[in-house]
Structure formats: C-alpha cells, structure tokens
C-alpha cells in the first residue's frame, strides 16, 4: 500500500488549522481540510524527514463538527479565498481548539498551568470583521478588476463576489468597487483598498501609485455619495493618508460601559472585531479589579483602548507606547474624553527595558499588558531581574496583579514562564478570546498574581 492509500486518524488541529495525524511508522502528517476525529486519506505535497504536508483526498469517517461553509469562495481548490481556514468547522468547536492551543502552549513552552480556565469570550460568527486589507488587481487578459483577499497560498487575488465575515453592507460593496476601479484612469495602478469601520462610518483607504486625475477623484466622490462611505487617499506610506474631502462624521468607536469614545484614523491599529473588543475591555478591567485609590500602568497602550476605561476606575493611569506619534494621539483621546487629568502617557522602546526603567516609572499595584505578536519579553525579564535583585530597581515593588492580553499564544507562554518561574507569579487564570472566527488566530487573556 502506498502512502496515499493509507487511512489516517486525525488527532488534532495545528495553528494553521491543518489536521494532524500520524502514519503507522509514526511520521507526522499535516492535512489541510481534515478535522480532529476524522479518518482520511491525503495527497502529500511536501515531504521532510520527520513530517509531511498534504491535502485531504478522501474521507471515511466524518467529524460531527464538520459543517457546510457559508462562503461560496471557501475551499481547497485552486482560486479559493485564503482569508478563512476553519469555515468547515463548527464555531463552538473552533473555540475549543483555540483553548487547547493556549493550554498546550502554556504547558509545553512555559511549564505553566492556569489555576482557572476562563469562559471563552465569543460573539457573532459572521459579519464581524470591521477592518480588512483588500487587494486590488486589474486582470488585463480578462478585462476585469478583482477586489478581495488573496487565494490560498497564492499572490493572486481571489475572484470574490461576497464575503460573509465582512458586515453585510461592506460585503455588498465588493462588486460595485470592482466596477468603480475598472472605470478609473488609474485602474492598473491601484493595488489596495483598506477598510476601517467606526460605529457609524465606513472608511475606505485607496492606495494609489500615481496622482489621481480629476475624473478619477470625481468618480470616488460619486461612489461615496451613492454608498455612504468616506474615501481616504494613500499616495505613499501610512503617514500620507488623508481624506479626499472633509468629512462631516468622524471615524470613532465607543466603549459605552465606560463612557469612552475613541477617535481613530483608518490606518491606526484598532481591533478587527468591535463587539468582541467591548467584551474584552470589560473582562480585562473586571479581572484587574482596580480600586479607586490605585495607580495602574498600561504597557503597549496604543490609542488608549484600555487606558481610558481604566482612568474611569483608578486614581491615575500611566500609558506607555513605542512611538511619540501614537502617544500624542493617546493624549488627544484622553482630552476628548475629559480624562487628561487622570492619565499620563510616555513613549519609549518597550523591547529594551531594564529594572531601572521600572523604578523610573514608579510602582503600581496593577498592570495591563497588551503587546503585539512579539510579546513582552523585555518587560517580563526586567520584572524578574528586579525581583531577584531589588538593588537594580531601588524603591520599586512589583505589581500584585498583571492582566496580559495576547494575540500570540507562543509569546504569551514564553513570557508566562519568566513571570512564574523567575518573578514569583502564579498564573491564576487564562482563557481565549474568539476575536477572529473561522481563522486559526488565537487571542487570549491571562492573569498573573503575586502574593
């Protein structure tokens, strides 16, 4: 029997949403399209000494969690959209797998086990994506324009007519956008449209590689008037983004439980899923248990997504971020919400920290840490060094509680290992946040306490 004839029992999913199985000789096989509990055959495309990678070719035993994908562009075939990888898996089962990924990373990479598993944060599975980067391509041979995500494992743009993970009003714009771009003089020099939605505004950022003609600008204005969107133009890098025309409605989102409104630009980092973000902020602040007389530090504060709600609860909040420009925007948002008197913002390189830096920022009973994918290793290491040698951070005391929000379970686990094994913390709770349904992305939250 050849390898391709062998029936394989799928044991789990990996971080790329591939089924993981083992051959009779123990060799690991990663199988696109296969789900845990299924018995499948696979066509292998890559072979290494210790593993193989392939695509499901036959299914003998089907998982009860297998569902019919809602998107007509989902699949393993040539030309399928690569934007989602788990639409064939029931949403509740997706969350369970993501929770397992978090727990496995903590256990295997950090030798840490959370004392309590938090209930997953979840929301609607469709129409949730309020940020997206849509590629644009003029296909000369077909005389048409494509607007959407890339095909699976390809630089080509998928031929998309709809996208169920986008809000319905945005999905309905895909075909009109194709027609608009095709009508423009610069149609071959427009590589990207970035979507950013506020609570009441749809902003579209058009990347253009040459100045737009007057007729092209007029076409954009007519489209905006017809479809109720704002056009922003990006002739160069992100700093060059500007409105085509002055807009009446500003781009912002609200955190109503905290009386906070967050203005932002369409190229700013904001969470893709606004509904889940509201629940996440509420969960994080609830876990932090801030008292009115306490001081809090928000590391990697961004525009103030956590800082400003924290300022409603704490005596003072210090937000620290990596760029002066972003810190200036955070200060503007604090003034906009009447919180300038309870907040302070500092800019510094957060990937180079020492115990003396912690002492310079002062002690705080509670920290909120929300780093990018690279994690917060320098911060965790500085804490550990200061705990082990207090003379390196004179007068400083470690926070009693840290709430760590992560978009990468591997770097969270790495940092958790430092905090637990070197800084004297215990991981009192951890859980997942399903920020990106139907993708393999794992967002999570963990609580570290020091008695």
Image (spheres, rainbow, N blue to C red):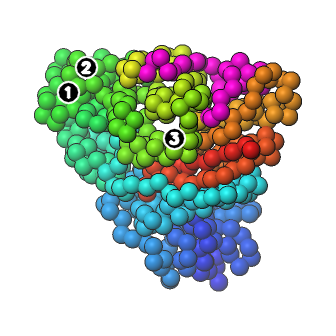
Is residue 352 a member of the stretch shown in magenta? Answer: yes
Distance of label 1 from label 3 (alpha carbons): 42 Å
Distance of label 2 from label 3 (alpha carbons): 38 Å
The residue pinned by badge 2 equals 244
Q: Could you tell me which secondary element the residue under label 2 belongs to?
A: loop
Where residue 49 appears, x then y in whole percent?
75, 62
Is residue 116 a member of the stretch shown in magenta? Answer: no
Look at the picture and state if 415 lies above or below 93.
Answer: above
**Dot placed on the residue nearer the N-terminal end, 2 or 1:** 1
Look at the picture and state if 104 lies above or below 146.
Answer: below
Residues at marks 2 and 1 touching, judged by CB atoms closer than 8 Å: yes
- Neighbour class for label 1 at 10 Å: few (<14), some, many (≥20)? many
The residue pinned by badge 3 equals 285
Residues at marks 1 and 3 touching, judged by CB atoms closer than 8 Å: no
Q: Could you tell me which secondary element the residue under label 3 belongs to?
A: helix
Which numbered disc covers residue 212? none
- Point out the stretch of residues depicted in magenta: 339-367
Give the residue displayed 45% in from the left and 77% down from the top: 64
Distance of label 2 from label 1 (alpha carbons): 9 Å
Look at the picture and state if 11 lies above or below 301.
Answer: below
Pick whichever, 203 or 178, lies toward us. Answer: 203
The residue pinned by badge 1 equals 220
Give the residue displayed 65% in from the left and 29% down from the top: 364
In this rendering, would 389 be left or right of 129?
Answer: right
């Amino acid at each position: 029997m050849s390898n391709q004839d062998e029936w394989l029992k799928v044991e789990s999913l990996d971080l790329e949403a591939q089924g993981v199985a083992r051959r009779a000789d123990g060799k690991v096989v990663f199988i696109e399209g296969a789900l845990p509990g299924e018995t499948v055959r696979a066509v292998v495309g890559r072979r290494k000494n210790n593993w193989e990678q392939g695509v499901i070719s036959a299914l003998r035993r089907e998982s009860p969690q297998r569902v019919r994908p809602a998107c007509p562009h989902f699949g393993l075939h040539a030309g399928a959209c690569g934007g989602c990888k788990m639409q064939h898996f029931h949403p509740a089962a997706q969350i369970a797998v993501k929770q397992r990924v978090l727990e496995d990373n903590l256990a295997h990479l950090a030798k840490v086990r959370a004392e309590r598993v938090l209930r997953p944060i979840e929301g609607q599975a469709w129409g949730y994506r309020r940020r997206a980067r849509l590629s644009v391509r003029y296909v000369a041979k077909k005389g048409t324009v494509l607007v959407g995500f890339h095909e699976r494992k390809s630089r080509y743009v998928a031929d998309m007519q709809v996208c169920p993970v986008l809000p319905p009003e945005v999905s309905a714009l895909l075909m009109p956008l194709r027609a608009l771009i095709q009508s423009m003089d610069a149609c071959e020099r427009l590589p990207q449209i970035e979507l950013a939605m506020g609570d009441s505004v749809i902003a579209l950022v058009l990347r253009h590689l040459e100045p737009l003609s007057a007729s092209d600008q007029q076409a954009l204005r007519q489209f905006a008037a017809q479809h109720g969107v704002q056009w922003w133009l990006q002739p160069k890098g992100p700093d060059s983004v500007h409105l085509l025309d002055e807009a009446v409605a500003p781009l912002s989102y609200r955190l109503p439980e905290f009386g906070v409104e967050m203005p932002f630009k369409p190229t700013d980092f904001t969470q893709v899923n606004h509904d889940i973000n509201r629940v996440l902020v509420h969960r994080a602040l609830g876990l932090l248990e801030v008292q009115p007389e306490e001081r809090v530090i928000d590391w990697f504060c961004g525009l103030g997504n956590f800082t400003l709600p924290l300022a409603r609860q704490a005596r003072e909040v210090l937000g620290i971020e990596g760029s002066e420009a972003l810190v200036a925007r955070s200060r503007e948002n604090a003034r906009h919400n009447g919180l300038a008197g309870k907040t302070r913002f500092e800019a510094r390189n957060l990937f180079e920290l020492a115990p003396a830096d912690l002492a310079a920022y002062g002690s705080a009973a509670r920290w909120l840490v929300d780093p990018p994918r690279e994690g917060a290793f320098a911060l965790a290491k500085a804490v550990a060094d200061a705990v082990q040698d207090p003379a390196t951070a004179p007068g400083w005391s470690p926070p009693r509680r840290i709430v760590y929000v992560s978009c990468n379970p591997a770097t969270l686990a790495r940092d958790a290992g430092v905090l637990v094994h070197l800084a004297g913390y215990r991981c009192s709770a951890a859980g997942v946040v399903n920020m990106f349904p139907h993708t393999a992305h794992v967002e999570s939250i963990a609580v570290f306490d020091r008695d």
